[in-house]
Image (cartoon, helix red, strand yellow):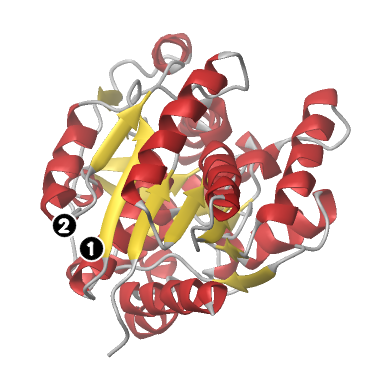
Amino acid sequence: MASGLRIIHCFRSPVGGIFRHVRDLVAAQAAAGHQVGIICDSSTGGELEEHYFDEIRGMLALGVSRITIHRHIGPGDIAAGWRTYKLIKELRPDVLHGHGAKGGALARVFGSLLRVSRFRVARLYSPHGGVLHYDAGTPKGRILFAIERLLGRFTDHVLFVSDYERRTFVEKIGEPKSAASLVYNGLNDKEFEPVPANPDAADFLYIGMMRDLKGPDIFIDALAAASGKVGRPLSAVMVGDGADLPSYKTQVVERGLAEHVQFLPPMPARKAFALGRIIVVPSRAEAMPYIVLEALAAGKTMIATTVGGIPEIFDPASPALVSPTVEGVTAGMAGAIGDEHCFAAAMPSQTELRLRFGAAVMAQQVEDAYRASLS
């Protein structure tokens, strides 16, 4: 049996898909006999995220280190960087795996500094969308992509979570200077247990971060328009939190939906799935969203926009795929309400999902990349 590795996952915010991805890797890597640790931001996350940390803390032989890591580049990065470097040097990892733009920068810069100090460490990077959402025609986009090209010289392996992410990386940044692999996000066996809707479930469910990139505003406008199309008020539950939440609550009132839309705080996805019959993912941009995979594994009917890696999950002709516009999501909502059986039958099969998006497959492919980087 191959010897265990000392693995550190670096990322900024312990919320959303990146945190979910890291938790899955932690569980699989700890079970495989590796020593694993986390370095992430201390200023984000709430009660739900603390619950998730409690679930994995016992698996983290190298602990959880939380420091202030700001979303945007600024003077605070110097202090955060120095603290991070000292932590990493003390932990002496074999593998530094950076997730997202900030985590990727920390892992590659400090992994390279460790190499100068004659530590052998593999430097891996998973973009998870991140900077790829920026426009190459903007000053900020040009700066961030230039930084990514520079960091590419200090990278041993890039792990993409969708072919869309890989193509976008090549288009905006260039071909990776290192080895690169496509490794889809993975689900564990328990997630393939069905979650039936509650008897009083709403027509639709939105679950995710409350920010425009994820499309809550599209969801609300489409709900109002679809209600007009089907001739009755459609109900919805919106689960999540974020800085833009107050504006969405105002939007619901302005659209005359106050009696038909319920806002709830973040909760585990499988608990939320019971609150709606049809799940809507109205995102403007994604890499490979876990929420789509989780919902399908739980046997839920859904509508999702054709952004990022989402089309890689469905049959190209699936009625579940809609454009990331109010008109597209409206048509999907009205169609699904009109024929829920047809939409349900169009979802990918459980067998297909297990083969392509299993957690064991994901973890083994990631470990293969680690060991290839160390060879």
Please identify the quarter of the rendering in which residue 162 is found: bottom right
Taking the spot 52% from the left edge, 50% from the top edge, the residue there is: 114
Q: Which residue is mark 1?
A: 27
Which residue is situated farthest in the front direction here? 117
Q: Residue visible at 40% across and 10% down?
A: 246
Q: Give the amino acid at mark 1.
A: Ala
Give the mark toward the camera: 2 or 1: 2
Mark 1 residue element: helix
Residue for badge 2: 59
38 or 278: nearer the viewer:
38
Left or right: 145 in relation to 9? right
Q: Earlier in the sequence, mark 2 or mark 1?
A: 1
Q: Residue 299, how many percent across, how many down?
A: 28, 66
Residue 320 vertical position relative to residue 173 in the rendered view, above or below? below
Q: Position of residue 64 (x, y in %)?
A: 25, 41
Q: Nearer the viewer, residue 317 or 91?
A: 91
Residue type at the position of mark 2? Met
Q: Quadrant of the C terminus?
A: bottom right
Q: CA distance from mark 2 to mark 1?
A: 7 Å
- Residue 130 at x, y = what percent? 60, 41
